[in-house]
Image: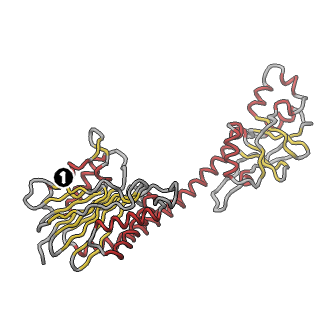
Amino acid sequence: MDIPTHRLPDYRPRFQQPSAADLCVPTPSVTAEDSNERVMEIFSKYRDLTSLPVTDNGKPIGLINRGIFLTQMNKPFHKEVYSRKSSIAFMDKEPLVVEADMDIETLTFRAVNYGEKALGDGFIITDNGRFTGIGHGLQLMRVVADMQAARNRQIMHSIEYASVIQRSMLRTSRDTMQHTLNDADLVWEPRDVVGGDFYYFVARHDGWFGTVADCTGHGVPGAFMTLIASSCLGQAIDQHGPTDPSLLLCSVNRGIKQMLGQVNGQDETPESDDGMDAACFWYDASTRQLLFAGAKTSLFVLHPGADGVEMVDGDRECVGYVDSGLDFTWQKRTVQMHAGSLVFVTTDGLIDQIGGPKSIAFGKRRIRDLILSKRDRPCNEINRAMQQALNDWQGHNHRRDDVTFFCFRVQEPQ
């Protein structure tokens, strides 16, 4: 029987799920009636043949490993003893046998569970139980790698499109901020393509409302949480108006807990223990008062002529999460602002970033020191300096979290 020289097929990724048939290489075989002399002839003819199937009436019964066979036959007197004996003498009686229509994922699990033998010797492929060819472990690994790369590309395309959606969702708020405030700047840097931080701005004739929030997680899970939280916030503003930050946090808290099944009696064991930290503030243009409510988030405030940066701390209670109270009320704090007063608010991605010579957190003190040193500069310059300081501090360390910070200065009345 003349068989073409044994070669691995050139696999190229396909859009449809490949199967064992895609790995099938036509291979010579022997029967139990064939002698080891015949096995030697085939291995001598096909130099790259690593294993030789043994069949009985077209059905596989074993697999002869080339290396094992040649090692045994080259031992003293073994050729004389075994050459005319049946090919089953050095046959593996329990090779991995799979049907041609088996999908690659199932085949991979079978091969891994079978052990190194299936990956090294290969596996027999059948069609309705009849021998059709051999599959090779190396080729299987190539196919799995190509499939994973294709999936990763598809996932990345989806995430990149999700980033477009997330940025579009934030664009209205950024435009509102830029058109409402003369001296203000916002930095939004997701750790991954999409992120778990978001911001929200609303302007009215008598003032403006702003939020900087950090949802659970980052990447895709964090981005999903931003959609939930920002939707709850938008509904709360539509219902209550933007002038009471404390009331809005309470409303968002209830909305998140209800949406994620964190309310007692709704689910005994909620699947999601997620929520957010946030700073919500309403600036009253007529009184120059900043009304602030914070969930594990603080404001950095620097008034004209002040020697240091004032910290206005929020409450230690998060919004959402299983352990937070459904009826918790965040304290509303009033900060009297003046022309030239500077306000800076950030998510903890900036504060908690590890770096520096001792690999410690960036911390609040460095933020206060930088604000003091740049107090007379425009807000966009302050934020660029903060970005540079963060990058220098981070160095070769991994970015731990999404980073969002907002800076604005109170202007003289028009």
Q: Is residue 13 visible?
A: yes
Report x, y in % for residue 317. Answer: 33, 55
Nearest the viewer among 112 and 45 is 112
Q: Position of residue 364 (x, y in %)?
A: 23, 50
Going by the picture, which residue comes out furthest to the bottom?
205
Query: What amino acid is labelled 1 in the image?
Result: Arg
Residue nearer the viewer, 46 or 285: 285
User: Is residue 324 rendered to the left or right of residue 389?
Assistant: right
Residue displayed at 15% across by 57% down:
374
Q: Residue furthest top?
A: 76
Which quadrant of the structure image shows residue 405? bottom left
Q: Tag 1's secondary structure?
A: helix
- Indicate whether 176 appears above or below 367: below
At 18% across and 74% down in the image, what residue appears? Answer: 285
Q: Is residue 366 left or right of residue 355?
A: left
Q: Residues within 10 Å of mark 1 (few under 14, many from 20)?
A: some
* Residue 221, horizontal then vertical, whole percent: 46, 58
Residue 97 in the image, given as x and y percentages of width and height = 78, 45
Count of marks, rendered view: 1
Q: Which residue is mark 1?
A: 368
| Any part of residue 44 in sight | no
Judged left or right of residue 36, residue 411 is left
Res 32 quadrant in image? top right
Q: Compared to 46, does 301 lie above or below?
A: below
